[in-house]
Image: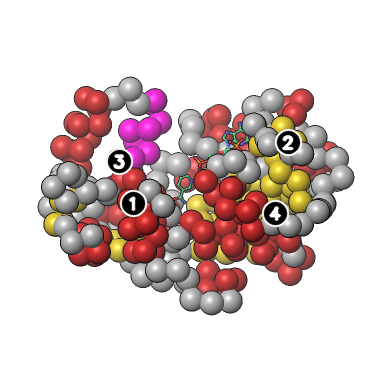
Amino acid sequence: MLMITGATGALGKLVTARLADRADVVIGSRAPAPGGRRVDFDDPASLDFGGVDTLLVISAGAAEDDVVVARHEAAISAAEKAGVRHLVYTSLSGDGDHLTYALAHRWTERRLRRSSMNWTILRNGLYAEFLAAIAAPGPDGTIAAPLGDGRLAAVARDDLAEVAARVATDPAPHAGRTYELIGEQALGGKDLAEAIHGAYEPGTLAATREAITAAAQALPFQIPMLLSTYSAIAGGFLDGTGVEDRGALRTLLGRQPRPPIEAYRAALQGS
Ligand SMILES: NC(=O)c1ccc[n+]([C@@H]2O[C@H](COP(=O)([O-])OP(=O)(O)OC[C@H]3O[C@@H](n4cnc5c(N)ncnc54)[C@H](OP(=O)(O)O)[C@@H]3O)[C@@H](O)[C@H]2O)c1
């Protein structure tokens, strides 16, 4: 049996949709649909992985490091206790080490490498859809996100879902492997603006920091999370050039990745 946690998140939904016709797949979520199991990493009593051979753990949301680490520790130790044979974890690409949210991912990877289970780490690059959230045009069509001249090797979320579904349904060949799943084309502000027939007039990180802080109903981790994303892109860390095996996404998909610019455009249109 394969269980997918976080099945009602954006990535989880795409994974489960691909596996909807399989009787051996169980959906785990904090709010599962009928037939699924309630799985909440914050509630150890809900972590019943009995009968599960493979567990696909979709990283558990954005939160402070200690919260995410505790969630992932709870999930991994419950999986070990239940005799899960293989755990597949959706992590963050290696070039994302400068992002404030990298720590919890790296902690989880280290915990898995020490675990008694087989494991596979899917180091997901930042989604093109995420880029649509942080670099959307204003009402006049101008993108003002502080990306400077930096570019992001963004990935269509659906490509990452397809890889996760493939690996989780046939995990044995992927045991002990860590895959860097970043896009092949890096997108900068000018590329985004061109695709939507808009303009790119990058703001400064300082102005963005001020605006976010002033607007904030933000939780403490959210401001550094967003700012580190902008500064890592602007600093050139996420353009893909720092990743050695840039072909893993194409290899695991068995085809060319979806153009991230299309995923960006579709996300802006809400489709
Ligand atoms: N690569 C990127 O660009 C990017 C961008 C944003 C986030 N992420 C990371 O990738 C993950 C999946 O992305 P997404 O787009 O699907 O994010 P999302 O739509 O925000 O979904 C959040 C996910 O976190 C799970 N979650 C939250 N709290 C949990 C808990 N206490 N126990 C178990 N699961 C919990 C949710 O599961 P249920 O609601 O089903 O319980 C859901 O799968 C995120 O959680 C985040 O860690 C990556």
Q: Is residue 218 visible in the rendered structure shown here?
A: yes
Q: Position of residue 100 (x, y in %)?
A: 41, 41
Q: Earlier in the sequence, mark 2 or mark 1?
A: 2
Identify residue for label 1.
269
Badge 3, how many Cα within 10 Å: few under 14, some, many 20+?
some
For this view, does 30 lie left or right of residue 137?
right
Q: Residue at x 36, y 70 (%)?
A: 185
Badge 2 vs badge 4, beta-carbon distance below 8 Å: no
Q: Cα distance, mark 3 to mark 2?
A: 39 Å
For this view, does 148 lie left or right of residue 114?
left
Q: Secondary structure at mark 4?
A: loop
Q: Cα distance, mark 2 to mark 4?
A: 14 Å
Magenta highlight on residue 192: no
Q: Earlier in the sequence, mark 3 or mark 2?
A: 2
Badge 2 vs badge 1, beta-carbon distance below 8 Å: no
**Which range is magenta?**
219-229
Task: Tell me the number on the disc at residue 34.
Answer: 2
What amino acid type is highlighted by mark number 3? Leu
What amino acid type is highlighted by mark number 1? Gln
For this view, does 164 lie left or right of residue 233?
right
Q: Secondary structure at mark 2?
A: loop
Q: Cα distance, mark 3 to mark 1?
A: 25 Å
What amino acid type is highlighted by mark number 2? Pro
